[in-house]
Amino acid sequence: MPYVNIRITREGASAEQKAALIQGATRLLVDVLGKNPETTVVVIDEIETDSWGIGGESVAGRREQGR
């Protein structure tokens, strides 16, 4: 049973976009590894930008500085 965890910042990804991610990740495992789509699990975690850090700074802080 493949398990895929996708983590994105919480910035308004639509239900349609998340559905496309789930379908695309499932299709990739089917196409590349021959996995059964019926047993493939895809979870999308949405993280607040102040809880996601890059280079020692939060994404929220970096964006405030225009980076």
Image: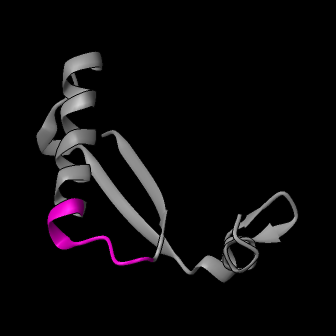
Quadrant (top left, top right, bottom left, bottom right) of the N terminus? top left
- Left or right: 18 in relation to 51: left
Image quarter (top left, top right, bottom left or bottom right) of the C terminus: bottom right
Residue 24, percent from left and from top = 22, 40
Q: For residue 34, which quarter of the picture?
A: top left
The image position of residue 53, as x and y in percent, is 74, 67
Q: Residue at x 43, y 54 (%)?
A: 6
- In the displayed structure, 19 sits above or below 3; it is below
The residue that appears at 14% across and 38% down in the rendered structure is 37
Q: Position of residue 44 (x, y in %)?
A: 37, 63
The figure's colour scheme reads: one colour
Near-viewer residue (42 or 12): 12
Q: Between residues 37 and 23, which one lies in front from this camera angle?
A: 23
Going by the image, does 41 lie left or right of 23? right
Residue stretch rendered in magenta on the structure: 11-17
Count of marks overlaid on the render: 0
